[in-house]
Amino acid sequence: MTLRTTAIIAGALGLLMLISGLIAQAARPAHAVVTEATLATPVVVLGPEVLALPELHRLAVTADGGVDAHTARPVDAEAWLVHHSATYITGYASWEEFTTRTASRIVADAATPSPGGTADAAPAAAATPSPSPDPAEAVPGEESVDYGSGDIWRHTWTGEGRVSLAVAAISPGEYLVVNSTDGADLGTIEVSADRQVNDAWISPLIWIGIALAVLGLLAVLSAIVDVRPLQERVEAWTTKRSRIATGEDPKAGSRRERRLAGSTLPDVDLEQKGDES
Amino acid sequence: MRRTVVAATATALLLAGCASTPPQATVTPSLQAEAALIDTQADAVIDATFAELTAADAARNPELFASRVAGNAALVRSAEYTVASNVADEQVSDLPSHMQGVYVSRSQTWPRMLAAVSEPPADDLTPVVYLWVQESVDKPYRLVAWAHMIPGAVLPAMPGEVDGAEELPLGEDGIDPSPRKALEDYVEYLRQGADSDLAANFTEDTYAKQLFSARAVLADAASSTGGAYVDTVQPVFAATFVLATSDGGALIFAPIDIASSFSVKDATLTLSARDAPLLQGDATDKVTYNYRDFVVLSVPPPGQSPLPGVVAAEHHLVSITP
């Protein structure tokens, strides 16, 4: 296998690495992710085990009216929640969806059923439809808006239409309880989190792929383009620079001349010197 | 080539997708502050109480005790309003709102309590011990009692506001005597008087002394007319709270109801100008003074020499009935 063939194979591999890297970069999920859920209760609860997730940053709850968010000791929050319908956020099903459970508290109507009641099948012709409900009338199953004392809440955040808070502001071990102030169902809950994305391999993959692809491209180009004239010129220039092969005599007194002449030890007449002594 | 590109694409998508599974909630962190109320909550309760008390004091109207003052505290303050409104120079008692100590429980059930010790209201007055009670999770903490400290008494060291103090049952057997026994003995001592054998079980306190002194005077006055004077002393165990102290002892917050019946024969009862506004009906030959007292009793830990003793107590007259 020649060097050129090896370079072409490396280039093909590099091209694949480049394509893979670019696709991975395009398909890479964002680090910041916001998970949202629609709520159908006046109260939403996040337990301490959910709030302890290190990826969580902020959360926000929306409603048509006022929204209050509170923290409390678990035992206090659980005692309070016994009397209220609530959605519990228990974790993540995926980055797009929470796992939840809903606890519904049914409040009986104030009117007690009469054991002696008679069934009447007559149509209620006399009844006139009312465009708006009478606020004084109790709707069966509807919860009271009275949330009672707030003494159990350790910290409270309030907002109109939306309340937003940093998860770091909640002490470890505490519940977060968010409720609408008017008793109506909340709108949505949004939790922003920092997703751990293992994408450190993408950039090296792309750059190595680019390098190999360039190498392969050069190898391919060398196979296509006739470079012999260029090689000749290069060789001629190299030979000219060396001046060895041309047979020219070295310049007189140059280092090359001395090198070619060999050793230059001085001649000493020993006999003549001994006669004098 | 096409297969290779497809394989590369699939690999890239797989690597990118598998890298980000959502977190799983598995570990429940422990609570940093076990107390039922942290300092900001306790401050809010105290501030709201004194705001309500200040408004009611200004109007001398107990109907303004909407949410923060209740029970015996409301009865006592109402009686003070009645007296102050009908007797010149009579003022309601001074209740300082600045606290030098707050005692929080770590109770996980209801009812639960909060206590606080004020700064001295004046140079010649001792600090006031307040007691708040929360009956249930949706009810506010309400001031239900207060009493001035006994001169010279020392409140034991209590656990801090982070962890709170453990609420002990009345029958706690890790303390000798148990809170119930200590309270029963003290109430019996109040019934029997200064000569009771139970007097040796408690350190001396001015509350009992004043009670016995008044009893002796009134009993003499009643008997001189052929009548009688009887004190009926009843603890209210259902409204009594016990907190563990830092050294293993107990601090008992106990309301005590006292009814002092004064009767005469062949004489006419005349109430003092201060007491007359509290009379409900007509005084003939017998009246009963109804008190809602509040006593704070300290029980030392086992093996320590000081006797149990009252550290705060107050004799609160709320009504006089025929």
Image (cartoon, coloured by chain):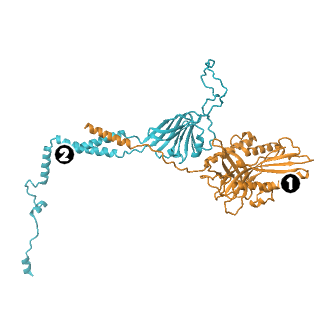
Q: Which residue is drawn at 77% across and 55% down?
A: B188
Secondary element type, mark 2: helix
Secondary element type, mark 1: helix
Quick one: which residue is furthest to the bottom in this view? A277
Chain for mark 1? B
Name the residue carrying label 2.
Answer: A4
Using the image, determine if residue A11 lies above or below residue B160.
Answer: above
Nearer to us: label 1 or label 2: 1
Viewer-side residue, B14 vs B122: B14
Name the residue carrying label 1.
Answer: B217
Give the left or right position of residue B265, taking residue A9 as reference.
Answer: right
Instruction: Indicate the position of residue A74 as horizontal and vertical percent values.
Output: 57, 46
Q: Quadrant of the C terminus of chain A?
A: bottom left
Give the spatial CA distance, label 1 vs label 2. Answer: 124 Å
Task: Please tell me if label 1 and label 2 are on a single chain.
Answer: no
Mark 1: which amino acid? Val
Letter of the chain shown cyan in the rendering: A
Q: Which residue is drawn at 13% across and 61% down?
A: A255
Chain for mark 2? A
Using the image, determine if residue B263 lies above or below residue B247.
Answer: above
Disc 1: CA contacts within 10 A as few (<14), some (14-19) or many (>=20): few
Instruction: Indicate the position of residue A90 as horizontal and vertical percent values.
Output: 50, 41
Give the left or right position of residue A153, taking residue A58 as reference.
Answer: right
Letter of the chain shown orange in the rendering: B
- The image quarter containing residue A115 is top right
Q: Is residue B282 visible?
A: yes
Disc 2: CA contacts within 10 A as few (<14), some (14-19) or many (>=20): some
Give the left or right position of residue B41, taking residue B200 as reference.
Answer: left
- The image quarter containing residue B140 is top right
Q: Residue at x 70, y 62 (%)?
A: B306
